[in-house]
Image (cartoon, rainbow, N blue to C red):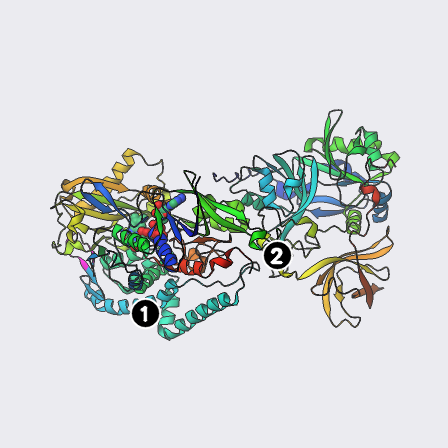
Amino acid sequence: MVKQKFDSIIIGGGHNGLVTAIKLAKAGQRVLVLEAKDQFGGAAVTRGLAPGYNISAAAHLLHLLPKKLQRELRLEQFGLVLAAQNLKTIALDLAGNHVVFDGKNLSGGTAADQSHYPTYHRDMQELARFFAPLLASRAPRLARGKHEPHARAEKLRDACNLAMTGLRLRLLGRRRMRQMLRIIGMNAYDLVDEHFESPLVKGAIALDAVIGTEFAPRTPGTVISYLYRLGAEYAAGNSLAQPQGGMGSVSAALVKAAEAAGVTLKLKSPVARILVSRADSSQGYDDEYAPDYASGVVTVNGTEYHANHIVSNVDPKTTVLQLAGPQHFDTDFVRRINNIRMKGVSGKLHLALKALPEFKGLSRLELGNRLLIAPSSEAIERAIDPTKYGEFAEQPVLEITIPTLADPSLAPAGTHLLSAVVVGIPTELKGGWKAESRKALLKNVMAVLESYAPGIGKLVVQSELLTPSDIAEEFALPGGCWHQGSLTFDQFYFMRPTYGASQYQTPLKGLYLCGAGNHPGGGVMGLAGYNAAQQVLRHPIKNQNSKG
Amino acid sequence: MMMRLSPKPALVKPAPDHFKQLLQESPFAKRAMPLCRTRDVMNWNGFALVNVYSTVEEEYFAIRNRSSVFDLAPMMKYRISGKDAEAYCNRLVTRDVRKQKPGRVSYVVWCDEAGMVIDDGTLFRFSATEFRLCSQERQIDWLLDCALGYDVTISDVSESIMALTLQGPTSASLLKLCGFKGVENIKPFEIKDWKIGKLAVTVSRTGFTADLGYELWVDAGDAIALWDLLFEHGQGRGLVPIGNEALNMARIEAGLLLPGIDFISSMANVRMGFCRSPYELGLDFTVDLAKPHFNGRAALVAEKQNETSRSKLIGLEIESNKPVNDSIVYSDESCQTEIGFVTSAIWSPTCKRNIAIAQINAPYYGTLTQFWVELYLKRELTWQRRVLEAWPVERPFFAHPRRRQTPAGDY
Ligand SMILES: Cc1cc2nc3c(=O)[nH]c(=O)nc-3n(C[C@H](O)[C@H](O)[C@H](O)COP(=O)(O)OP(=O)(O)OC[C@H]3O[C@@H](n4cnc5c(N)ncnc54)[C@H](O)[C@@H]3O)c2cc1C
């Protein structure tokens, strides 16, 4: 049993964990990252699909990682190259009359839609601008328990944050403020219905509101998840992009940055438990008042590592209940953590293709964009509805990329890859996932694809369809939830992951959270990790385990 | 560690006409009710329970001078068993359960994350892995939520286990007459099993009276047999059944607290700031901050360390002989500065003192030695206002040495 001492240990080398590690190391800390798998990046990875074919196995589009953060972490210098930028979103039409979203411009759809879209886009961007700063900063706390830190500076920071939010709400102007307050509690279905005529336009926008959640457009609260996504995109200041070498390149650049910053990185080191100790007189405490604190971790193979701060990139529920253990927390907190809902209704389809498929009405050039098969809001509703009853969609909804157009390095010369988020698959299938049910699901997905891209089936060399439970397994994301905690109104902002831990800090001294399960949530965004590092740095090490 | 949530207890399906009877009948009712000459019955936890059988005076003096029996049917009883039962209980309550040996009972309180008291009760430890928690209020939801991550089974045994509390100086000798051989040797807070004929009785030397007394636990089906056994031999020891009112007098003399009367359970509390910590209830002796983590520890550490208790429940003695129920307490005779209120009060017939339990705000408790209590008296429809002097005194107000004496006195 080896004992090593670090300033901070990051459990999990997902992109957020890596961001935290870099930020802490740059501040002078000795940092260790322990990743369970044989690859860093978590759900931002590139991995093999078939010999010579490498796929972005979970996330496949880069649009949320803030430009500012990329610059601060010097990701370009560490090898992050974008193979494609400014991708358009194309809502596919069976007859080939596609609708194209390109920034504030819309082509296709009805004339009324086309003339209204720029106004709609501008209005939504204004609201996104309001949300963006909320995402980039830590959520304030409305109330502190009497045993929680009362530091004046902390309270002041929160008060300022809230006041600024209030001020910015006023600054939106009367019309936009009213507009926001009116729509914020609405569902996406009604919102798009108010604004547009064409089912394709409505379907594409409604899909933006619900993709990555377990909700359908008619579910209450889907406008807030929509604004949230727009806010995150606004904060990022990027276009839709595709990294050279797949999403794993983002993580690879982060790993290089981490190495350069002096972070110790270990793969295949799954953490079994977080070690908890009681502080003692050597740290200046009376027995009676000494707090418990997270003092280290022990890996599955029994190696112990010790540090002043333990920062978990693993979802909050698993971190608290499995890694630390409920006995170190109060029942009220455990109950709230245990109630965190983590669900997903999206799977991932990966196809290795002999040749480039043909989509009706799309040129070769256009194929490299973000392609949606979401013919209407109703179609999305219908695809997601069965998941509530443990069934999968007859006609799943798809978000497709063909990354090999911009980045041929991902597949053998002349061949291609198709990566698609498949919406309409339950985590738990009635009767359980069996070979036949997987086959039936794949058949449904391929039938949808075939109707837009006739002949695509014949091009398939290798296919893989990850169900939400496969995703849960492969990426350690319970429920197949992209966000380590559903993005619902009750799990947003200062309720994320729950009160008492909404500032990346658990009630257990020294135990921090930095993953997507925390504010501002999932997506390859890096902000949860960034904000968490800032919170850790607010607690200087020399004071960590001593009084005051 | 594997996560595990105890299965929710199966719902007991009520009889189809259950609604016709508003209050549940105690298994002792067949014997108790015919003895109730006042028809003064109250609702305790959904049970019809006798408030006064004959006269409060007779019943009260039976507690203090003879033997009294009180029906504990409405008491909530929870069985906590399994490998992690000790660790579970230790996280639940503020006391160090590891120090409690099998065969012992302790008085415990349990808190929420803010360190506010949810309830108090008695924790029985039968073995390394089996406990029973008795409380006045229903706690099953909380107990099940606390079980997350522990290998324990929690079951509500309130209706399958029944108890009578036998209190008074002659209680040990009465039990001996009933055949409880060697009962005088069990120590305060000790538990022992007896078999009297076919009747299995668990005896604990516990009670609410600060005097010699026992609680007798049987299967619900044996309730009548237990009652009959006691009354068969009771006459020579002056045994009488007592109702709630007399017992309440004894419990105030004993300085014991009641949820809903002396404090508000933080689960039932609605208004901010009205619930209380164990320190604020004067229950410091039940809190062991040095033990491993337990519910409310961080908050209680902060309270103790920063001395932020907002108030304290203390004992008061008041001039005159008029009980000061519900009175407001002032720091000055002119009643300008309100500093607290009375939660329980009686004229104590045994102590011959006018006593009360009162919540006194910081910083007045511990520093002031003179208080003023405002009392309104109704005299033949006419209200009179009195301002009475009061001073802090130790709780319990009454505590007879025989309550601790072992072997128990043979009166
Ligand atoms: C199918 C799918 C498609 C998506 N598409 C997109 C997209 O196109 N664009 C986008 O921006 N976002 C997308 N997302 C969301 C995005 O991928 C995630 O929200 C994000 O990657 C989460 O990052 P994270 O660092 O917070 O957590 P994770 O990536 O989950 O990282 C957690 C890390 O901890 C490790 N770990 C877990 N347990 C242990 C342990 N006990 N010991 C050590 N290590 C452990 C895991 O192996 C993992 O590496 C998608 C997600 C999915 C699932």
Q: Quadrant of residue A352?
A: top left
Check the picture and name the quadrant holding the C terminus of chain A.
bottom right
Q: Give SS at disc 1.
A: helix
For image coordinates 49% across by 39% down, the residue present is B4
- The location of residue A476, given as percent across then percent down, is 36, 44
Q: Can residue A214 be seen from the camera position used here?
A: no
* Residue range (magenta): A89-99
Q: Chain of mark 2?
A: B
Return the x and y of residue B173 as percentages of the image width and height.
Answer: 84, 34
- Crowd tier of the residue under label 1, counting other residues whose Cα lies within 10 Å: few below 14, some 14–19, many 20 or above: some
In the shown orientation, is residue B374 left or right of residue A454?
A: right
Query: Furthest-top residue in view?
Result: B197
Q: Circle 2 sits on which residue?
A: B269
A317 and B33: which is toward the camera: A317
| B189 part of magenta stretch | no
Is A523 rendered above or below residue A142? above
Decide if residue A242 is on the left or right side of residue A215: left
Residue B160 coordinates in the image, percent (x, y): 65, 35
Q: Which residue is mark 1?
A: A126
Front residue of B86/B239: it is: B86
Asked which secondary structure carries label 2, the reply is: loop
Q: Amino acid at mark 1?
A: Glu
Q: Is residue B194 visible?
A: yes
Nearer the observer, A110 or A443: A443
Question: Residue at horizontal 58%, vertical 48%?
Answer: B294
The quarter of the picture where the N terminus of chain A appears is top left
Residue A199 found in image quarter: bottom left
Structural distance between the alpha carbons of marks 2 and 1: 43 Å
Question: Could you tell me residue B95's position as x and y percent?
Answer: 65, 46
